Every structure is written in C-alpha cells, then in structure tokens.
Amino acid sequence: MAGAARALLRAGAFLAMATGLAAAHELPQRPVQDFVVPPAGSYALPAIQTVPDGQILDSTGSPRRLAPFVTGAITLLGFVYTYCTDPLGCPLAYDTFVELRGRVLADPALRGRVRFVFLSLDPQNDTPAAMRLYGGRLAARDGPLPWHFLTARSMAELGPILEGFGQDAAPETDAAGRPTRGISHMLKVFLIDRRGRVREIYTTAYLLPEVMLNDARSLVMEEDRRPRGTAP
C-alpha cells in the first residue's frame, strides 16, 4: 500500500481515539495470497442471492433505502463498526478497501463502474456523524468511485438487513457473561452486481485485493457482453 494511504489510516485511527471512539492501534496483517489468480473473464461467478432492501441512514443522517446503494453499479459492501480493534476484522476491511480504491481508480475498465459501501453493525454508537468521521476524506457520494458510509436508526431496522445477507452479529460478553462494547461477527465483504445479486462473498482468508479486482473485472466483462436491450 502507498505510504500516503498508510498515513491516512494512522491519522484516522488517531482521530477516532481522540473523539472517544476505540480504534485499532496497528494496521492489520493482510492474508497472504499463495496462488495465481485466474485471468478476469475466464471463470463464472454464479448468483448466490438477491440482496435485501431495508431502511438505512446515509452519512448526512437522511433516511434512505438500501436498494439504491447496492444496484446500478458493481458494489463491494462490508459490514463494520467504527471502534472495532480486531486486526482480522473491520480494520482489515478498511485497509483492503483503501488498497482497492487506488487500484480501481487506476483501472480504466473499472473506474466509474464500481462503488464501495460500509454499513455499520452498531447503529446505537455509529451515528451518521461517527460514520462521517470514520470515512474522512475517503467518503464520497459521487465521482469515479463513490464510497458510502451508512448506518441505521436502530437494530430493529438493521436486523432484517443482516438476516437477509446472512451476516452474523452479536454483542461480545465478558467472563461473567455481561455484554461488552465489542461486537462478535465474521468479517464478510459482498461483491454485488448491477442487478443487486451477490456474486461472491469474501471472508478474512480470501480478502485479497487481486482476487477482488479480477472478480469485479469479470462482472464488467459480463455486462459488456450482454446484448443491448436486455435487463441491466
């Protein structure tokens, strides 16, 4: 990763701690890619499921539906929370998305056709203001690579979205069984096509930028092969 991006992550962690949000103290150790990635377009990515819709809040606090954030463009969506300190959890997702951001913007085939979405697992603490802070200057609602930092008004509204994605999330407990501020969840990032269909799910071991880029390129190639007049 470029030095500027690493500096930005360190600055973001410091700013989060300064405002009372817990943050990772070290950058995560990315999983090692020990295989050659097949060429883009040389393999199929069958549809796994249709993404659920639901009520969310954008980073300005405006009520929105999730659907416009997961249709109309190739979308990489991750569930995170701002104060996560697990080096193989949310900090790894953030670090990987920063790496991907630079590579997508440098790729003419992907630039302007991909969006990023982070949706908080903790609407109680991750207010729209907290999500704006978490995104910092990387948050963009338009441009060649939009990156949206979303939350919800309550767990009651977030719960059906999590269930629809199959994303687990539960409060962590201490030795006495009392809930702590942390959230236990499996890190998942969803690759979603323009029609709102999940085409790949990346867990920690497979959160590899080269793999994710080639999968996105494969979806672009699939779209470009589609005859004109067919459904997008």
Image (cartoon, rainbow, N blue to C red):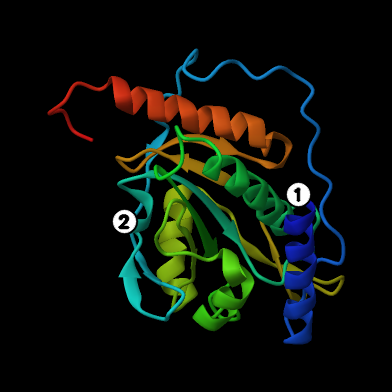
Q: Residue at x 39, y 23 (%)?
A: 221
Q: Is residue 152 left or right of residue 32?
A: left
| Location of residue 32 with respect to 55 vertically, above or below | above
Q: Is disc 1 in contact with disc 2, using a CB cutoff of under 8 Å? A: no
Q: Residue at x 65, y 52 (%)?
A: 98
**Image mark for residue 47:** none
Number of other residues with Cα within 10 Å of mark 2, as a class: few under 14, some 14 to 19, many 20 or more: some
Which of the 4 image quadrants contains residue 91? Answer: bottom right
| Location of residue 182 with respect to 184 vertically, above or below | below
* Quadrant placement of the C terminus: top left
Where does label 2 land, which residue?
67
Q: Residue at x 40, y 71 (%)?
A: 157
Q: Amino acid at mark 2?
A: Ala
Q: CA distance from mark 1 to mark 2?
A: 33 Å
Residue 188 shows up from this direction = no
Residue 140 shows up from this direction = yes
- Helix, strand or loop for disc 1: loop
Q: Is residue 225 left or right of residue 38?
A: left
Number of other residues with Cα within 10 Å of mark 1, as a class: few under 14, some 14 to 19, many 20 or more: few
Q: Amino acid at mark 1?
A: Ala
Q: Residue at x 80, y 54 (%)?
A: 3
Residue 174 lies, in percent from the top left, at 83, 72
Residue 205 lies, in percent from the top left, at 73, 36
Task: Please tell me whether mark 1 or mark 2 is closer to you in this view.
Answer: 1
Q: Nearer the viewer, residue 101 or 155?
A: 101
Which of the 4 image quadrants contains residue 48? Answer: top left
Where does label 1 land, which residue?
2
- Helix, strand or loop for disc 2: helix
